[in-house]
Amino acid sequence: MKLYKKAGNTIQILSFPGEDISKGCYLIIEDGHAKRSMIVQVIDVQFANVPGIMEELLRDSFEDESVCGEQTDPLDITCHILYIQDARLLICKIHGTVENEELVLDNCWLPSRTQSKIRRLSIKSLFDLLGIGRSLPILLGETYELTHLIVDARALDGKLNIITGKKGTGKSHLSKILVLGLVDQMATTIVLDLNGEYARLGFTSDGKENRYCRKIHVLVPALNFRVPLAQTSLSVMQKILIYALNLPGISSREFRRIWKSLHERGSLTLHDLGEAIKGWNCNQNVKDALYSRYYSLVHSNFFTDHPAEGVLLQEIFQKTENGGAIVIDLSDASPTERQIVVEYTLGMLQELLSERSIKPVFLFAEEAHLYLRETYWDDIVTRMRHLGVFTTFITNQPNTVQENIYRQADNVFLFNFINEHDLEIISRAAKVDVETAISIVRDLPPHYCLVLGTAVKDFPIVVKVRELDVQTGGQTRLFFSERQIERASIARSSET
Amino acid sequence: MLLIQQLHYSTTPRYNFPPHPEDLQLPPKLIELSLTSLQNLRGEFFQPHDVESTEPMLNQQEEDKTSFRRKAFSIQLVPLRPVCDGTPIIAIDVSSVKIGETENGILCALRAAVVWSQKRRYIYHRFGPFPVHIGEENKKEVIGLLRGHRFPVSTSSDLIDIQVKLCNLVEKWIQLNVCSSSASSIILWDGSLTAGPNGSPPGVISQLLEISRQRANTVLAFSKASKMRFLGHKITEVSLRYPPPWIFEVGEMPFSPSLHLLGNVYVARFRINGYSFRLDIDKMISVDQKIDAVQRLIGNELVFQSYPESLRLAHIYATFTANEIIGIQHYLAQEFNLKLLAPRDLRKTLFGPYGTGLRD
């Protein structure tokens, strides 16, 4: 390999046949005289612009049915000519400098073009240099070199993460690996499970209980996740009414009065709430508005008047003190019910965290745009993060995640995207070098993910996400079964 | 006698297309010269030639800048009628290129191409490339080889001249091979049938033409450029109203006595939208045979732009591309441990951006 050009933080390297270099590889440019080495990552592999190549290819193109021939080349020079024709140009991004065996972020120097030696830097050597994954390891998978990619759980602690990629590339699978990895590290995670995919995390693929079985707490709203109205704070209830049920401000103020009056009387039940709204002395429109919201609450079946039927989030959190996942299964909930549950959960979380009743939690939100209200996006990256809610967004529609989330994301896990518009959106993430992301992500095979950010010390690494022996719920139900297809093919063959 | 020891003449059947392309052989002497000249360079430095500015070396052809006065120049236009009879067409072209310079010589490469055409199907055979070092230490040996094949070379000849002569020698080797292994074919050469001190020796060309005649072959030599002029105009640019295809013979010419015209010189144009070319046809065959040969050429061969397709292909397959020159430079560095020096452009060094124009 030979150093060819440098422009900005891009370096071009000439590579020849036999040097097995692909996109995503790291190279080290060692300048013996400067006693420094530069670490670069290959983001694209192109054909070298060899002079005369067009003439050569045109000449070869004559060969068809009407033109053929042979060559007498006793000195075997043709292989040298082909060697030059196959030369490649590696487009690389500079990532750092190694000086005295220490990694420094000094990219202002230029290695010698003639004296430098370029070799492939193994991912293992890079990890050793970066010190990735040493204290609280979470195994994500394998790199192209079959080296394990282990990230440190601390890289997710206090951080905002995004997992995105097109449909069917393995986003939820990686999310499950992170959830279980955090559980292994005794962390508490909450999963807002839109498709019921996480409910069977405690079971192996053949249906047996696995080591996580006792640590996965699946809460199905209106089924085993109902909350006593009396245990719900006014602020949480008001958030539900305003943000989930769109209660206007004036009506909200009347509701506050009703709630306080019931609270003082010690009769905060669904029945009494309904009666109070009915008999409340206020404008009829306000009364109608309150009454319609009251019925939505009742029909959601999420609230109960019987403490024995209710679940207290504090108690669930206590069960996860030594690590556990609370999976809130929203798969059977209507959009309004989903919003009520999410408002309740996030509202309670904020209260519990501000009271310091619980430890910080890791929140995994699948397709959050379907249940998260507008103002929460800002809350999540600012206030809630400070309180101790560290969110991971999982989506296959990158445009549904707000731009400020991308800008503030600490870790981005990118699966394959082809659509230019999607690529343009993900390139807004601060931790993403636009060219790196677009060039590598476009060619990622399914189940391969480009990890960017704190987890990999800002050295983008491609990983094949490891397999997980858990039951995968939420798979798309198909009309044609394997059996049906088999039967059809047998019928066809018997006809012929 | 050219290469008499390498060739085994055998009776070639009529219409033996393809005429055993695998039988075509290059003399071991050339390969030997190539290898020994390079072996002697092992470990030395060489300055590669800038591939962007590399121009293939043209074969040296004998031609006078002859100008005709009106009286001396007669035009007898011969209209042509294409004869399609399946006659094989064989075209030959050779090229050489400068690869670089060593401390005491030049590195060049030679390559030859032969293209057989019959029924609009083409088979080519390429020979080479053969890198050769021509330096002061082996100049004598190369000159000896050329003189041994009747190529007149002075000991004071410069290295580029020797390179061109070597290229001519390879061309004659290939032409001899083709002329003696094919029969009843039309053989196309690139250039003219003029012999002289700067080009091919008259004896060599005469011998090649004679072998061709013995085997019922006809040699047609096409020149892309001619310096012959009529009333100040190039003969190939003389405008005639008669629609092609036609040829006309350029009459008696006042050539230098040192030049030997072994063919009759014609101007040929085969297509309305094509160009006119100088066409030399063996002097020793009858006019009818000459015209018949040209009619068979245009009847059996594509003559896009008036130029025979097989000759165009032979040129394309013989030519060195910039990529091939780099490949040969790589071969020299790898196999003979030649160390590359950065190309030096003294004009640029001295004059900076004003160092344009002809190179030293």
Image (tube, coloured by chain):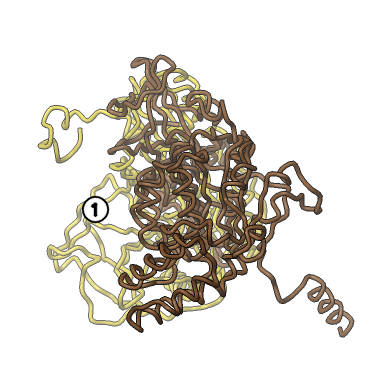
Chain colours: A brown, B yellow
Asked which quadrant contains residue B57, the reply is top left
In the image shown, does A122 or A364 lie closer to the viewer?
Answer: A364
Q: Which residue bears the numbered disc 1?
A: B255
Q: Is residue B14 above or below residue A436?
A: below
Most foreground residue, A87 or A304? A304
Asked whether, in this view, residue B220 is left or right of residue B242, the answer is right
Look at label 1 and name its amino acid. Answer: Phe
Question: x%, y% of residue B39?
Answer: 50, 22
Residue B275, placed above or below residue B30: below
- Residue placed most toward the observer, A269 or B129: A269
Instruction: Look at 78% across and 70% down and name the residue there.
Output: A482
B24 or A404: nearer the viewer:
A404
Name the residue at 28% across, 38% down.
A8
The disc numbered 1 marks a residue on which chain?
B
The total of numbered circles placed on residues is: 1
Q: Quadrant of residue A490?
A: bottom right
Q: Quadrant of the C terminus of chain A?
A: bottom right
Q: Residue at x 77, y 49 (%)?
A: A204
Q: Position of residue A336 (x, y in %)?
A: 50, 71
Expressed as whole percent of the image width and height from the top left, the position of residue A94 reads: 37, 34
- Judge whether residue B169 can be spotted in this image: no
- Dot 1, crowdedness within 10 Å: few (<14), some or many (≥20)? some
Left or right: residue A400 compared with residue B119: left
Q: Residue at x 87, y 85 (%)?
A: A495
Could you tell me residue A343's position as x and y percent? Answer: 47, 60
Element type at mark 1: loop
Query: Can you say whether B160 is above or below B46 in the image?
Result: below
Which of the 4 image quadrants contains residue A229? bottom right
**Quick check: can you spot residue A328?**
yes
